[in-house]
Amino acid sequence: MDFDQEIDALGLLCPLPVLKARKRLKGMVAGEVLKLVTDDPAAVIDVPHFCSEQGYNLQDVSVQENDERAYYIKVEA
């Protein structure tokens, strides 16, 4: 999937991956996609909840090696 910016949050635990994503997303414009890579087990709950609460569109989640997941978050208008 295409993305405009990426955050490597590997090794960071809740709530840091979501906090880093929130900070980066605030500086992005509508239509841009952020790729958030994390191995935090709580992210499977935290990231979708954050997106629905803040009005971001969780486009896709892909499972990678070593229990890493990539979350693709789109900024809506």
Image (cartoon, rainbow, N blue to C red):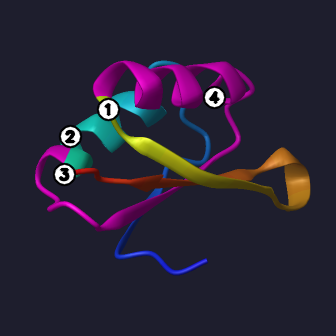
Camera-near label (1 vs 4) is: 1
Q: Secondary structure at mark 3?
A: loop
Sort mark 2 into few (<14), some (14-19) or many (20+) by Cα contacts within 10 Å.
few
Residue 6 painted magenta: no
Q: Inspect the image, locate mark 2, and give the three-letter code of the amino acid beneath it.
A: Lys
Work out how far the residue at label 4 is from the one at label 2, CA to CA, in angstroms.
Answer: 16 Å
Q: Inspect the image, locate mark 3, and give the three-letter code of the amino acid beneath it.
A: Ala
Between residues 58 and 27, which one lies in front from this camera angle? 58
Q: Position of residue 24 (x, y in %)?
A: 23, 50
Q: Is 37 drawn above or below residue 14 in the view shown?
A: below
Residue labelled with disc 2 = 23
Work out how far the residue at label 1 is from the one at label 3, CA to CA, in angstroms.
Answer: 9 Å
Check residue 77 in the rendering and tell me which mark sits there, or answer none. 3
Q: Position of residue 67 (x, y in %)?
A: 86, 46
Camera-near label (1 vs 2) is: 1
71 to the left or right of 23: right
Stretch of the chain drawn in magenta: 26-54
Q: Is 75 drawn above or below residue 40 in the view shown?
A: below
